[in-house]
Every structure is written in C-alpha cells, then in structure tokens.
Image (spheres, rainbow, N blue to C red):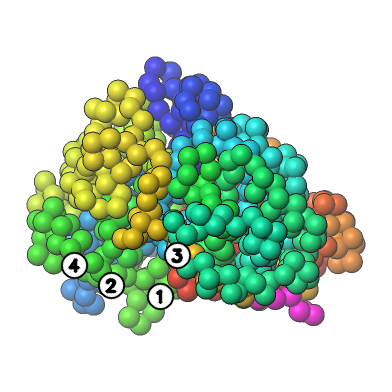
Amino acid sequence: MTDTHCPYCALQCAMSITGGKVSPREFPTNRGGLCQKGWTAAELLTSPARLTTPLVRRDGELRPATWDEALDVVADGLRRLRAEHGPDAVGVFGGGGLTNEKSYLLGKFARVALGTSQIDYNGRFCMSSAAAAGNRAFGLDRGMPFPVTDLDGAGAVLLVGGNPAETMPPFVQHLRGAELIVVDPRRTATAELATLHLQPAPGTDLALALGLLHVAVADGHLDEDYRRERTTGFDAAWRIAASWWPERVERVTGVPVADQRAAVRVLAEARGAYVLTGRGTEQHASGSDTVSAWINLALALGLPGREGSGYGCLTGQGNGQGGREHGQKADQLPGYRKIDDPLAREHVRKVWGVDELPGPGRSAYELLDALGQPGGPKALLVFGSNVVVSAPRAAHVADRLAALDLLVVADLVLSETAALADVVLPVTQWAEESGTMTNLEGRVLLRQRAVAPPEGVRSDLDVLHGLAVRLGQPAERFPTEPEVVFEELREASRGGPADYSGVSYERLRRGEALHWPVVVDSTPRLFLDRFAHPDGRARFVPVDHRGPAELPDAEYPLQATTGRVLRHYQSGAQTRLVRELAEAEPETYVEVHPDTATRAGLAEGQLSAVVSRRGRTVARVRCVPSMRLDVVFLPFHFPGEGRANLLTNPVLDPTSRMPEFKVCAVRLEPV
Ligand SMILES: Nc1nc2c(c(=O)[nH]1)N[C@H]1C(S)=C(S)[C@@H](COP(=O)(O)OP(=O)(O)OC[C@H]3O[C@@H](n4cnc5c(=O)[nH]c(N)nc54)[C@H](O)[C@@H]3O)O[C@H]1N2
Ligand SMILES: Nc1nc2c(c(=O)[nH]1)N[C@H]1C(S)=C(S)[C@@H](COP(=O)(O)OP(=O)(O)OC[C@H]3O[C@@H](n4cnc5c(=O)[nH]c(N)nc54)[C@H](O)[C@@H]3O)O[C@H]1N2
Ligand code: SF4
Ligand SMILES: [Mo]
C-alpha cells in the first residue's frame, strides 16, 4: 500500500493505492472522502487508451517511433528553427496539473535550454485574475491564506462563482456549519445548500460587489478600527461604491435589494465570516477588478488577516497553486519571483549557473494566437494541456496550431491536441512517478510512486532531460530524479515570496503539514500580523463596473456561460476515457429555461445549435426551470463540434490576461 493523492483537482484528496486500486485516506482536507473522479482514477493507469510509444508524423500520419527517433526529430526541428528565426521561434505551453518539479524544470528548460521568452501555461485560464487581485490587495498571492479546516468554524461564508458540490465534493463538508450565501447565475447543487442564493446575470458581479460594499457602509458595518490600522485606500474605493446604491445594483444584476441587504447582514453579524471566489466571478475580461471588488468588501468587514475569518480563492487544478510559483508563467521565475526584477534574475541565474535569461513572454492566449504568425513562434511544445478543447475561440486556436512548423505534445493519452501534433511523447502519470503538489491551502504534498509505469513511457523530467542534452546542455543541469529537482527548486525559491527552502521530501514523508513560505516553520495562516506590502497594510483597490465585453443583441439575444460537471475533468481528455464517468455523462448539453427553449423552437432532449460570433456548437437541450430566462450554460469538457470553446470570446482581462470564458452572446437554433 502506498499513500498518495488524487490526480485531479486542487483539493488533492488523500488516497492509498493497493494493487493498482484506490482507497480513500483520512486527511484534513477530504476527511476520508473522494468524489467519483477520484474513486475511478486508477482506471487510466491500465487503460488501453494509454499511449505507450512515441509517435512521429510521417506522410501525414502519426506512426510509432523509438524514443531516440522521436527526440531527435524534435531536437533537430528546434535547432533548425532557432538558427533560422532566433530563440523566440520556439514556444512552450505548460499546465497547472504538473508537479512542482515538472513546472520548475519546464521553466528552466525554456529559459536555459531553448533561451526562449515564449512560455506560459493553462493557469492563465484559471487562477490569473484571483492571483492578480490577491497580489494587489495583500502583496502576496496564496489562494487560501489559511487551512481549509478553518472554514469549519465559520459563522458565514459568501461563495462567489464557485460550485464545489460538483467541482470539489469533499470540500463541501467544511461549509456545513456556516450560513452559506452563494452567488451564481445558475441554481447549482451548491446553491441548493445555501441559506441565500443571489442569481446575478453573468458578468455583473463587479456591480454586485460594489453594491454590497455600499450596503455594508450605509448600514453601519464598516470595521473602522481595522480600516484605520490594517488598510489603505478606502476613500478612493468608496468614492466609486458610493454611487452603486442598491436599486441601481438590482437594475444591473437582477439581484433584489432585500437580498443584497440580507447577504451583508449575515456576513457582518456572523462570528467569523469568509469570502471565497471561484472561476465564475474570475473568468471575465474584468476578472481582476471583480476579485478586487470582493476583496474590498472583505476588507470593509475586517475579515482578511484575522484568525477565524478571511478571503480566499478556490484554486482549481491539482497543482494550480504550485504551478503558478515555479516559473512556467511568462512573467515569473521560481519562488514566485518577477522575471523583470533584477535581483530575482540574479538569484535564479546563479542557481542555474547561466549568464543570461530571457525577459517576459506572451500570455497563454496571446501565445496561442501568435503561433505561425509573423514574429510568433514556429514550434510549440505542450506539456499538460489540451488547448484545442480548453482554450477560448478554439477553432482559431486549432488553425494556429496547424500553421506551426513543429507541434510536440507530451501526454498520457492521445488528447485532441496530441492528435494534431507532429511528435507525441508518451509520459508517466501521477501514481507512476513521485513529485510534490501544492494544494489549494498552500500545503506542499508528496505524491509517491505507487505502481510501475507501462513499458515504453518516460517521465516529463526524462523528456526534458533528453531534449536538453540533445540541445547541447550539460546532463546534470536537467536531473531526472524528482527529489534532486526539488533540492534545486528549494534553492531557486529561497528568499522569494513562495519560499520552499525549508521543505524537504524527508519532512513530507514524515507527514509534516508544510504550508509555504517554509524557511524553517510552516505558515498555515498568512497576514495575521501584517500583510505583505512594505507598509504591512492591505490595499483597497478602486474599481468600477464595466460589464461583459459582449452584450446580447437582436442577433444573439442570450448569454452563454460555461463551466464544469461533477463527472468530467477539464478538457475531458482523461475522464472521457473512464467508463463509469463517460457512461454517466456521455455528451455535451446546454442548460436552458424551458420557456427560452420553446421560444427557440426547441424541446427537452433535442439537439440545438448554439451560435456565437466565433462559431457554432451542437448540444442536447436540458430544460432547467431554475435557469434565468436570458442565460444558457454549457460544460466545456467535450470535444469536436460539442466544444463550448467554439463559442467563447477571447477578449482578455488587461491585468491578468484571463479570457472571458464565463460570458458571451449566443442564440439557439434547432439543428
Ligand atoms: N468535476 C470537476 N471538478 C473540477 C474541475 C473539473 O473540470 N471538473 N476542474 C478543477 C479546476 S481546474 C477548477 S479551476 C475548478 C473550478 O471550480 P468552480 O469555480 O466551482 O467551477 P466552474 O463550473 O467553472 O464555475 C463555477 C460556477 O460559476 C458560475 N458562473 C458563471 N458565470 C458566472 C458569473 O458571471 N458570476 C458568478 N458569480 N458565477 C458565474 C457557473 O454557473 C458555475 O456554477 O474546479 C476544479 N474541479
Ligand atoms: N469554456 C471554458 N473553458 C475553460 C474553462 C471554463 O471554465 N470554461 N476553464 C479553464 C480552466 S480553469 C482550466 S484549468 C483549463 C484546463 O484545460 P486544459 O489545460 O486542457 O486541462 P486538462 O484537460 O487537464 O489537460 C491536461 C492534459 O495533460 C495531460 N496530462 C495530465 N497529467 C500530465 C502530466 O503529468 N504530464 C503531461 N505531459 N501531461 C499530463 C492530460 O491527459 C490532458 O490531455 O481550461 C480552461 N478552459
Ligand atoms: S474532489 Fe478533487 S482531489 Fe478529491 S477526489 Fe475529487 S477530483 Fe480528486
Ligand atoms: Mo482551472
């Protein structure tokens, strides 16, 4: 029996593996619980769909090749493109599911072995708006700056744009003791658990948050002592919120004045309250400002940086937290350092033993959009993402991939993106390798190898090593042993905001709870004494409502929003191959109010075309009476013409470069 953690989401539920079978394990976050995805996770270890040999495209078809052949093809291609067009002709796309060791080595590989600035990752589609807002307000971004179990004692929780009943089922037990207020345009399984459900139109959360701040101040709930001692910038933020009186907010969002007042009262009067945000409120072209507005509300009520209350964002991918700290993001170096900070560059240069480092590159969507264009990358290496399904304006992204001279995908299965590649490299997964993950509460976990990998696959670390050596790098610069990579990561992160220098495999094996920063001791709770800005104070950030980039009109009268269902994970590349999950949720669908369906000439169970300015998706109609009349919902887990991302608007948040996944204008048509 080997103790490990789930391959999927950021809750990183603890499990054991015995003879290739999963059983749940007691742990503070999941308390012995697993969701259906976790229970069935082992099926993919032995699935016939597993890739076990490298594939190289010859005469238009992917054909089996040896590892040497495949790596030679890649290295030759990269060398040639670099020689002809310079180092930025090669791009790298990483993922928040990769272990800390892989994220770290991928960033080092890009900057050192390729010398390219063109690296970013799918966390840009996930965490970036909350991260930007957290940094602005607190001077540091750790999704939850407190352990999940602190929520057990909460009197009230405001959960905005998150549906953990489907996205992190075992997490919900931590909300049981609190009065729960859910903000979601849909009446989700999570909203069903709430005392109060606010149902705004998609993309109007910023107005709602300004309105709740207005009510908090007008109704006398501003925590004056806290504001004076622990924050700055209230006046500028208030000047904007002052004009968002509740009736105006109701007109823009659809949330009744009485519900706005009730929500603020519940939060203000609770002993111990938390504000939590999920992707619903973050994945907008105004996502960073929207999260800032929710943090402003939390600051006005005096919640962050106090024991028993706070603000947190629910990180999504397995290593969504660690994945954003170790340098696979375009503007970052390991330890959550900024790539344009001269001291950070010097520190990392020394650890890596190199004289030069490239500067910041393009953000994820901008990188994909530039592929094959003049001045853009001509080759792309993808590790841990299925962008053909998960990136916005997906048909355009597929066109950009097709315009490349060389597309290389490392994956465990032939994802829709891998199927388009010139070279596919089959890698080990989760239980077949060791590595560390940092969960949603900033706790570093060790996932230990539990089973032998199938013959023919190699780890991502091995792949990076093999390519780096072929590109002329010294072999020892790209270690293949996770623990050796981690030892180097410790040094690279030392002194940075996300300092892992005190974390070791040995301490993790002993089961120590280590929340970063860890120089010697763990930091389960941040900000109790001071926030991370130089003056120790949190910042109110003045933000105003802008609304979605695309509003409904006569041609596209409805708003589509997108998200997740219990049984599938992300692009579905993994979960669509697990029989129990695929049978229960075999195809995409569109949730729509019955009256809206009728008006479009549609009925329950029929196929509908959902059409936006970017494209057309085909989905089966599910009539849901609790839906708003003006909103439809599609999950984004399905491929082909069922891709929700054929519709989505790639307009970006100016600060975080997050695309507006959560709202675009559409119409429904019978097929
Ligand atoms: N089953 C499952 N679990 C997962 C994942 C998965 O793919 N499947 N992925 C993991 C990852 S990477 C992530 S990031 C997390 C995401 O976890 P969540 O944030 O919980 O997931 P989503 O379904 O994307 O969005 C949550 C809710 O936002 C609502 N929403 C849409 N538009 C708006 C809006 O304008 N305002 C507000 N307030 N709400 C809105 C949607 O109706 C939806 O119910 O889940 C993780 N867990
Ligand atoms: N419309 C819409 N689109 C969205 C979202 C939304 O809410 N709505 N959410 C966005 C969010 S929050 C996210 S996080 C993204 C996620 O979307 P993706 O980035 O596509 O995430 P996954 O489907 O998890 O893709 C991971 C791929 O890597 C493979 N893989 C898993 N582990 C490893 C590994 O260790 N090494 C390697 N090399 N490969 C591995 C898997 O088999 C899979 O093919 O989607 C975004 N797209
Ligand atoms: S909640 Fe997340 S970590 Fe837990 S079993 Fe489900 S997918 Fe795995
Ligand atoms: Mo995510």
The residue sitting at the bottom extreme is: 374
Q: How many marks?
A: 4
The residue depicted at 82 percent of the width and 52 percent of the height is 626
Q: Amino acid at mark 3?
A: Thr
C-alpha span from label 1 to label 2: 11 Å
Classify mark 2: residues with Cα within 10 Å, few (<14), some (14-19) or many (20+): many
Report whether residue 39 is seen: no
Q: Secondary structure at mark 1?
A: helix
Rendered location of residue 181, percent (x, y): 69, 47
Q: Which mark is residue 342?
A: 4
In this view, the mark in front (3 or 1): 3
Give the residue at mark 3.
232
Mark earlier in primary sequence (4, 3)? 3
Q: Is residue 597 left or right of residue 18?
A: right
Mark closest to the chain's N terminus, 3 or 1: 3
Place of residue 327 in the rendered image (x, y in percent of width and height, measured from the top left): 29, 56
Above-or-below relation of 654 to 502: below
* Local secondary structure at mark 4: helix
Going from N to C along the chain, the mark reached first, 3 or 2, is: 2
| Disc 1 target residue | 370
Let me know if residue 553 is in the magenta part.
Answer: yes
Under mark 4, the amino acid is: Pro
Under mark 2, the amino acid is Ala
Q: Main secondary structure of the magenta part?
A: loop
